[in-house]
Image (cartoon, coloured by chain):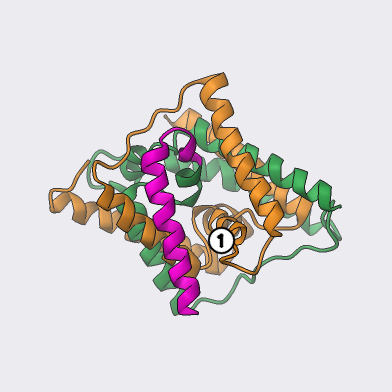
Chain colours: A green, B orange
Amino acid sequence: MVMRRALVSLASGGLFGSGLAVSGMMDPKRVRGFLDIFGDWDPTLAFVMGGATAVMALGWLIQGRMPAPAFADEFQLPGTRLIDLRLVTGSAMFGIGWGLAGLCPGPGLAALVIEPMSAGIFVASMVAGMAVHRAAKL
Amino acid sequence: MPFEGLIGGLLIGLAAALLLLGSGRIAGISGIAARALSLSQSGISASSAWMFMGGLLLGAIAVHFLISPIESSFPPSNALLIFGGLLVGFGTRLGSGCTSGHGVCGMSRFSRRSFVATLTFIASGITTVALANEAGWAW
């Protein structure tokens, strides 16, 4: 089971990375272009989100009919209802960083293979931000 | 390029569905990255987190060399990468997710929490880009 979960993780990561690469979302300028709705708007990210959420919605339908995941004892899923100040403040801060750099965590990490210097600076800063959050015990 | 975006999106959706149905976990990259580095105690195991990250890089490399070279233009200044990275790292941990966890996995589950998070970070990103353009920091 542990080995199979490791392979599932590897395959899932591989699909995710190839999807990011194919979609054009590893180009920070295009992601910034999606957020630039008052300028030269680039709608691509909306198509990426549309495609991904459509497939994942099917995934949730199948999940509802499965007593347990294929290679684990149970589904371990976060709650869906709690809306608090942390959620909103954290998401707002994430959005500012996303708009400044044109990168969110997935594309930032994947871009290490094409732009190691710039992506490395972004990823190191992102990890530092996560470590600050951890140290602050928020 | 909407067509490539849609195809890439379908692959991302498959990736998330595979992790859910295979391992019973949410494919949220900020959480997986934090887990790999022991900056989080919840979610998939640290070894699975490293496997996922390895796969992420391999998937991108495979497309780059086997299908077509990935085009990218990065921000012109390291300050944008540094401040952006710090805010992305801190914000995604405080808000418990990013574009993948809240955007793809949460919204497709009709999670109220994820709708609020996603609308918040998109609105905040749009505002940031608009203000940056006003300040002459367009790129």
Q: Which quadrant of the figure contains the C terminus of chain B?
A: top left
A132 drawn magenta: yes
- Picture mark count: 1
Q: Dot 1: few (<14), some (14–19), or many (≥20) neighbours within 10 Å?
A: many
B13 vs A133, left or right, is right
| Residue A66 in the image, given as x and y percentages of width and height | 84, 56
| Residue A34 position (above or below residue A124) | above
Disc 1 is attached to a residue of which chain? B
* Res. B125 in view: no
Measuring 65% from the left and 47% from the top, which residue is drawn there?
Answer: B52
Residue B50 versus residue A40: which sits nearer the camera? B50
Q: Amino acid at mark 1?
A: Ala
B55 drawn magenta: no
Mark 1 secondary-structure assignment = helix
Measuring 37% from the left and 32% from the top, which residue is drawn there?
Answer: B72
Measuring 71% from the left and 50% from the top, which residue is drawn there?
Answer: B19
| Residue A72 in the image, given as x and y percentages of width and height | 83, 57
Magenta span: A110-138
Residue A116 versus residue B17: which sits nearer the camera? A116
Q: Which quadrant of the figure contains the N terminus of chain B?
A: top left
Measuring 82% from the left and 63% from the top, which residue is drawn there?
Answer: A74
| Residue A62 position (above or below residue B119) | above
| Residue B130 position (above or below residue B68) | below
A66 vs A20, left or right, is right
Of helix, strand and loop, which mostly describes the magenta segment? helix
| Residue B5 position (above or below residue A9) | above
- Residue that carries the numbered disc 1 in the rendered image: B34
| Residue B4 in the image, given as x and y percentages of width and height | 49, 29
Residue A12 versus residue A43: which sits nearer the camera? A12
* Res. A7 in view: yes
